[in-house]
Amino acid sequence: MGTAPDYLDPQLAYTTQAVEAHWISYTGLLTYRHEEGEAGTELIPGLADGLPRISRDGLTYDFTLRRDLRYSDGTPVRASDYPYSIERMIRVPWGGRSFVTNYVVGADAFDTGRARSISGITANDATGRITIRLREPYGAFANVLAFPALAFVPRGTPIRNLSNDPPPGVGAYILTDVVPNRTFTLRRNPLFAGFRIPDIPTGNLDSIRVNIVSNTNSEAQQVLNNQADIFDPGDTLPPALLPQIEAQARDRFARKPVPSTFYFFLNTTIPPFNNEQARIAVNTAIDRDALSRIASGFLETDCFFIPRGIVGHPTSECPYGDRPDLARAQQILRDAGLEGAPVTVWGQERSPRKEYIDYYTDLLNKIGFRATERIIADTVYFPTIGNARTNPQTGFADWLQDFPNPSDFYLLMDGRSIQPTNNQNFSKVNDPHIQSELRKLNAVPATELDSVADEWAALDEYTARRAYVAVYGAEAVPKFFSDRLNFDAIFHPLYFNDWSTLSTK
């Protein structure tokens, strides 16, 4: 990996580098089928003995825990561990906790210190029954329950960052031997196969060692030369090596498109981007084709927030046209009296994300801002820009689907998801029209999404016109292995390389 996971504590982690490992180490009530493509987006029972029993009004989810489960340290799994696990997730806190605090009865009161527990989650150790009550219907709630961050940890697990010594979980593998920002290992869990959970692989490899190699050129070269076995899909292949990889490793390299949104956030609460004209100027000036070239063709250009492949992606033309218009952007800034406004642009060290920021900073200067870069280490980037004390003006951001639903992407536009730490709504959007539409659209069950596709598209067109972010495209990621591995391992639509299906030749 070129970038370390943001956290190895499953109830803090959010980056792809983290969830690749957590998906097979921490199983929740529900999880996803281990398949490629659309089949991999199907929810299946995890530690629950079946899919949820959902009340007719969509407000109550009932589960029964499988019997005789144990954590990786041998501790029995109890139904009462579940409300504790969710409370711990909120307290540590996880960046996506608004998926729970916005909907589960009592979760917001617990989050804000007005309650000592979450009243909407009850559990009975004798029967294994777990019941979750929502205060309003949320069509994607079953997908939320499949997040590794909502998996089981033992009751009493300390409520602090345990990334250096991850807590016990229930999964095919155990996270161990962590050296922060350098290496960690997954070892096969000897207990897991005995649980005989249908459709969840028990793993082929005895251990998987992950090394953090900050230079992606070295990372790619090691895989090309069979000195390492996997190039992490969350990293970008160096353009200079790409022709050699395509020529010499054709049978062990592929581009895998993933529903995703790459964008520059524009903080709507502070100058200059609290001015809509400043945001429109940025969107008018961006050359999305130039950014695709920087990505060596691993970026498909777009200007809408809901990406292709997700219900609700608009089919209309970009409101800012197909080509950048620097002269128009300069005029917009002059008319708004914003020429010379200082802007700090936040970005990551790794390529091509730093190059995106180099381009973006230069563009902001060309249209009339006085922009400077603030590049920080990849490992601390998202926690830093997601902290209210930082309150950044603008910078790099991206979002890869957590689940195949437009509501997942609109977490980043939901005013209720703004939080003081681990915030994901970096532009701090809190628009009454968006909030009104989300109250209606988020309630639609996933099985009925097609019926509101036009409404989602209309909302996304509105968001683009308001220029709350500057979207420039969606990415494809590399599946790139050494000669030692079979290339038929599953590439999952949510979690990338499915490490539990890796095997040696």
Image (tube, helix red, strand yellow):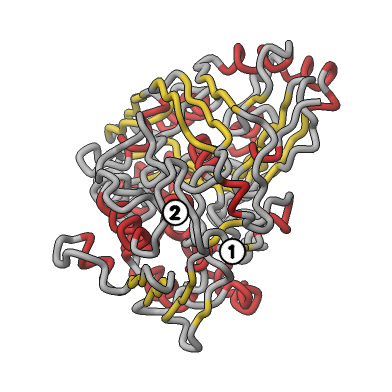
In the rendered view, tell whether residue 257 sits above or below residue 176: below
Front in this rendered view, residue 302 or 160: 160
In the rendered view, tell whether residue 231 sits above or below residue 195: above
Label annotation for residue 151:
2
Q: Mark 1 is on which residue type? A: Pro
Place of residue 335 in the rendered image (x, y in percent of width and height, measured from the top left): 34, 47
| Residue in the picture at 55% in, 47% down | 400
Place of residue 41 in the rendered image (x, y in percent of width and height, measured from the top left): 65, 58
Residue on which the image places disc 1: 45
| Residue in the picture at 68% in, 21% down | 229
Place of residue 190 in the rendered image (x, y in percent of width and height, measured from the top left): 57, 39
Q: Secondary structure at mark 1?
A: strand
Q: Mark 2 is on which residue type? A: Ala
| Residue in the picture at 42% in, 27% down | 378
Furthest residue in direction left, as rendered: 114
Label annotation for residue 186:
none
